[in-house]
Image (cartoon, rainbow, N blue to C red):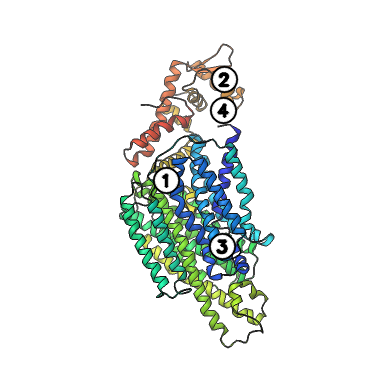
Amino acid sequence: MRQRGLGLIIVALMLGMLLAALDQTIVSTALPTIVGDLGGLEQLAWVVTGYMLASTVSTPLWGKLGDQYGRKRLFIGAIVIFLAGSALCGLSRNMGELIAFRAVQGLGGGGLMVLAQAIVGDVVSVRERGRYQGFFGAVFAVSSIVGPLLGGVFVDRLSWHWVFYVNLPLGAVALFVIVAVLPGDGSRARHTIDYGGVVLLGAATSCLVLVTTWGGTTYAWTSPVVIGLVAAAAALLVMWGFAERRAAEPVLPLGLFRLRAFSMASVVGFVVGFGMFGALTYLPLFLQVVHGVSPTLSGVYLLPMMAGMLTMSIVSGQIISRTGKYRFLPIAGTLCASAGMFLLSTMTEHSSLLIMGAYLLVLGVGLGMTMQVLVIVVQNAVSFENLGVATSGATFFRSIGGSFGVATLGAVFAATLNDDLREALRGVRLPAGFDPARVQEDPTVIQRLPPELAAGFLHVYADAIAAVFRVAAPIMLGAFVLSWFIPQARLRETTKAADLGEGLGAASAERSSLEEVERGLMRLADADLRRGYYERLGAAAGLDGITPQGVWVLTRLAGEGWVRAGALAERAQVSREWGRPYVDQLVVVGLVRRSEDGEELRLTDEGRRAAMRLVGCSREGLRRLVEDWGESTELERMVDRVAPELLGARVDRPR
């Protein structure tokens, strides 16, 4: 655990996850400039949607392939795919190329997020895993806040191409460290991978997103293209349903939808993703075009929304941990988010940025109260066997909701903009040689028009973006109504340990049910170790009078022969002089023996029995934390494995 390479591995893993998480939000503030350079305003939504769809749909495959073929080589492959996609995005010459290369980027990004979290379990001891999970949760939180801001900085200081090029040096560092330092993982888990389910669900989702993108704008709703896409989506969903019934390890078991908590949480999560990514995509356009602020400042003005989300995600997790109540949070959160959407729909070109910041704060607070809780609702409702797939299913619907939100609201924006432009240009004398279509291809042209003409175009853009929120507000209000149908149930202990990263991340790692419980258990254990754990453990094992420091020494000597006192002090990160009184006490009461030269320590027979009692008490404490999942051989084995590892004891596992 003290080897120098571990720190490098963790940094590389966090860097990989940061890159993938950033690319969900960093593009938003660069989109107006990208559209101005490449044209294709009507395709703007797909720059975001292409990444999210590829990342979300590929997530289950990366997780299971990593288990089956080794996570190191899969993680290296994910980095290479992501970097190739990033380089190609920066080299794009038109919107079609950019969208295609964003999908390549998303394919690699899904692997980065899934495998980085899985590899932590391979290289970090059980005792420290809870702390490292917190670090990775912080990566999601940081990326959601700084993404829009960094996108604006790169556009202002360099060019929009650097929104993608910045990934190359950072990703290269992560790749080098992983290749050089990360040991190969010998463990393998066989899976029957549901390739059919992944392909059919991804194809059906893509067809539906295309319907919402093209319907009523590029093609009429009654056109053969739109009708054909609807028919194809319906056929693919039916085929997916048949495939899931036959799959040994389905991507999303259909039986989960019979649970009211899962169904309602999935629908509400879909709408929350719809609102969050819709707002993130079109607000920078409003700020940069209508108010003329720089890309960097447009990222700054989005901070109230992101800060509200982060703060309320943390507060919601604390409330749930202390009270065990969660049902009221999505109800209040969706109502608050609906109010924020409605307030944003009232904005005009004359609205002040301060007022807009207040509206965004309301929206962010509402989303923060909801996103974190929906994962907890699902985890608490399903049986242990379905815990892993249900958790990834809940975040899948939020991610897909984001894809639909960007696409649907993009269609609303484009349709409203076209109608308003036709109305605004009726009877207006335009300057010689001025083509109104340029306003759609490059919104920044408005800033160079005469004031009286620019005012009309600014009103058109402001109204088109307000229309986005006029559509989103009633949809979010629908989520408020549905959230009343989420049932309240007694909260399981490991489910109380909220994972901030899962609440904010747009795509979840694909983990088994056992891994999900172990993550919660490690977060609880990590918190417990910091609150007088060894004192309580010693009392439970009948070691009255032994200091917590002495209990620590007993557990570290368990299962060992002679141990150098200096090595033990180094392990405790204290000097030998500081620890000597605690060891002296153990020697006096006959639990520890010193070598003749005083340099080495080992347990006496009585000390070994005391150490085994300590491990047994730790095991019982962990067992109580997971007993509300019901009887499971897997959970029993996990507790037997984790208990001695948590104490740093090297003892035989009970048979």
Of labels 3 and 1, the one closer to you: 3
| Sequence-wise first label, 4 or 1 | 1
Answer with the quarter of the image where residue 638 lies: top left
Q: Indicate the position of residue 310 as horizontal and vertical percent values.
A: 52, 54
| Sequence-wise first label, 4 or 3 | 3
| Sequence-wise first label, 1 or 2 | 1
Asked if the residue under mark 2 is in contact with the one under mark 1, i.e. CB atoms within 8 Å, the reply is no
> How far apart are the alpha carbons under marks 2 and 3?
63 Å
User: Label 1 sits on what residue type?
Assistant: Lys
- Please tell me whether residue 585 is drawn above or below residue 375 in the rendered image: above
Asked if the residue under mark 1 is in contact with the one under mark 4, i.e. CB atoms within 8 Å, the reply is no
Give the label on residue 564, or none.
Answer: 2
Q: Does any portion of residue 418 appear in the rendered image?
A: yes
Q: Which residue is mark 1?
A: 496
Q: Indicate the position of residue 235 as horizontal and vertical percent values.
A: 34, 63
User: Label 4 sits on what residue type?
Assistant: Arg
> How far apart are the alpha carbons under marks 4 and 1?
31 Å
The residue nearer to you, when weighing 604 against 135, is: 135
> How far apart are the alpha carbons under marks 3 and 1?
45 Å
Give the label on residue 70, or none.
Answer: none
> How far apart are the alpha carbons under marks 4 and 3?
54 Å
The residue nearer to you, when weighing 480 against 67, is: 67
Answer with the quarter of the image where residue 421 lies: bottom right
Please rate how many residues cluster around mark 3, counting C-alpha atoms within 10 Å: few if below 14, some from 14 to 19, many from 20: some
Helix, strand or loop at mark 4:
helix
Q: Looking at the image, which residue sits at the far bottom?
A: 427
